[in-house]
Image (tube, rainbow, N blue to C red):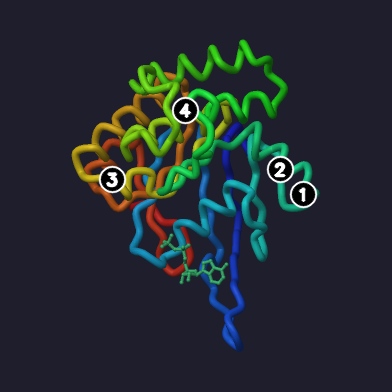
Amino acid sequence: MGDAVLQIEAVQQHYEQGDNVLSILKDANFTLNPGETVALVAPSGAGKSTLLHVAGLLEQPSAGEVYIGGRATTGLDDDTRTAMRRSDIGFVYQFHHLLPEFTALENVMMPQMIAGLSYKAASERAQQLLDYLRVGHRVDHRPPELSGGEQQRVAIARSVANAPLVLLADEPTGNLDPTTAGYVFEALDALVRQSGLAALIATHNHDIASLMDRRVTLEDGKVVEG
Ligand code: ADP
């Protein structure tokens, strides 16, 4: 196993659709090492979200094993998987999924308070993260009052609030105009590198992909070097 933060081993994912079985992942293998950033670039429908959901313990694979920080996860019960997802995995979606009735600061505090941090500690860390991502001046605003780029920065801050082992991002800038996407990605990349996080980021943007340490793609349900 080594000390990979994420290892996907012989993973298969099949979906039943009527009488058909869709085989999206077929013997997918992938290793993410500490501090490594990897772009996942593949056409729509190739299975990027499926791979990220399996890696993020949001879906159980049909077969194979997913190791997070060296620990096998497929045999674990739902509560343990949920606890691991909260402590070890940060997830950024294309759409931010922030809670609209809470401020930016509160959205970033929330996962920390669920993890047991005090109000003071959680608010200080949230402020630091939002400052780092250059939205520190918007902490008291609610998501609907923020621009798309600002919303995504807050979502990124929230995803790393509990200092996860691995960051998974599913087209995190896919909903933004190219200039804003560039700025948001720069902020994400700087945060990941400064904190020594490992990240697997699905993107259609080749400029963004070229900034990562490594690129992989999905071909016929397998992960191959891109
Ligand atoms: P990508 O992220 O590369 O666009 P996805 O992983 O979202 O690809 O989807 C790959 C394929 O799997 C698509 O054809 C999609 O319709 C199918 N798929 C994904 N999730 C499900 C599901 N829960 N049930 C049935 N089919 C699914």
Q: Of the residues under marks 3 and 1, which one precedes in the sequence? A: 1
Three-letter code for the amino acid on which mark 3 is drawn: Leu
Three-letter code for the amino acid on which mark 4 is drawn: Ala
Q: Report how far apart the C-alphas of labels 2 and 4 lie in the structure.
A: 24 Å
Q: Report how far apart the C-alphas of labels 3 and 2 lie in the structure.
A: 30 Å
As helix, strand or loop, the secondary structure at mark 1 comes to helix
Tag in front: 1 or 4? 4
Q: Which mark is residue 104?
A: 4
Q: Of the residues under marks 3 and 2, which one precedes in the sequence? A: 2
As helix, strand or loop, the secondary structure at mark 2 comes to helix
Q: Label 2 near label 1: C-beta < 8 Å?
A: yes
Image coordinates of residue 36 in percent, x first then y, are: 44, 33
The residue indicated by pointer 2 is 82
Residue at figure coordinates x 46%, y 46% from the top left: 93
Image coordinates of residue 204 in percent, x first then y, are: 30, 53
Left or right for 61, reference 157: right
Q: Of the residues under marks 4 and 3, which one precedes in the sequence? A: 4
Q: Which mark is residue 176?
A: 3
Three-letter code for the amino acid on which mark 1 is drawn: Asp
- Classify mark 3: residues with Cα within 10 Å, few (<14), some (14-19) or many (20+): some
Q: Report how far apart the C-alphas of labels 1 and 4 lie in the structure.
A: 29 Å
Q: Of the residues under marks 1 and 4, which one precedes in the sequence? A: 1
The residue indicated by pointer 1 is 78
